[in-house]
Amino acid sequence: MRCMPMESGMEWICQRQLASRIDRLSRMDTIKGPHPSTLEEEDLLKECDVEFGRATGPGGQNRNRRDTATTITHRPSGVVAAATERRSQAQNRSRAVFRLRMKLAATVRSRTHHEHHTCSELWNDRRQGRSISVNPMHRDYPSLLSEALDVIVARRYDVAGAAGVLGVSMSQLAKLVRHDKRSFAMINRGREAQGLPRLK
């Protein structure tokens, strides 16, 4: 069995073990068609179960007089998001939808080609030359994140190569995904499994 050194020079890893680690990292839900994080809210919720209930937490003694807590389950993937911190059911629902989009962006992959990806209209609208910027709390962020991750995973965590496909600099792409700790950690696990240095 052939083995290879990791970049640190301190650890050796067999190619069979490396392939196994990469395979485990690649076991995400993969879908065809539009990524669920990019859907209009009405269309996304058609794929979800929405539940309202009461939750303990900050907000005073009137906190639990109404069913303000919101839990949303995306049926195709099983991804669940919730919000309980507001007294308003509408505000909690809005927050839960955004959190669901973020979780879907991080855990569900759309199939794309590692070299011939066609950037979405939103991506092209947001991109300025080799730069792309978005507030991580903006409605567009989960959609942009999901597209970035689709290409990064398709290229086996080669972020520089993914940046080239997406028409932005590597630093800009890394900055985009760094806003989401879950996604950033996933990328670094994938890079380690590939023998690539971690992003900082």
Image (cartoon, rainbow, N blue to C red):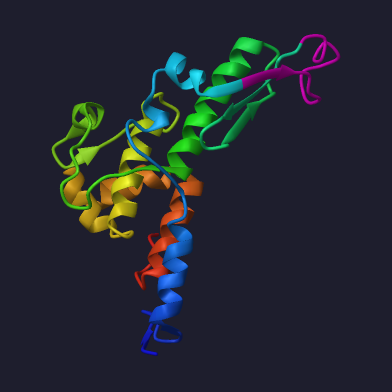
- Side of 49 relative to 121 (left or right): right
- 54 in magenta: yes
Magenta residues: mostly which secondary structure?
Answer: loop
Q: Residue 112: x, y in percent?
A: 26, 45
- Residue at point 33%, 50% (across, down): 174
**Is 194 rendered above or below residue 162?**
below
Q: 147 above or below 161?
A: above
Q: Quadrant of residue 62?
A: top right
Residue 40 percent location from the top left of the image:
39, 18
24 in magenta: no
- Rendered image quadrant of residue 50: top right
Say which residue appears at 18% left-offset and 48% top-offset.
Answer: 165
Q: Residue at x 43, y 17 (%)?
A: 43
Relative horizontal placement of residue 53, taking residue 175 as reference (left or right): right
Is 181 located above or below residue 63 in the figure?
Answer: below
Residue 168 visible, this angle: no
Q: Is residue 24 visible?
A: yes
Residue 1 at x, y = what percent?
A: 39, 90
Question: Where does residue 45 sit, x and y in percent of width and height?
Answer: 51, 19
Magenta segment, which residues? Answer: 50-66
Question: Foreground: 19 or 84?
Answer: 19
Name the foreground residue: 12 vs 78. 78
Question: Residue farthest to the left?
Answer: 129
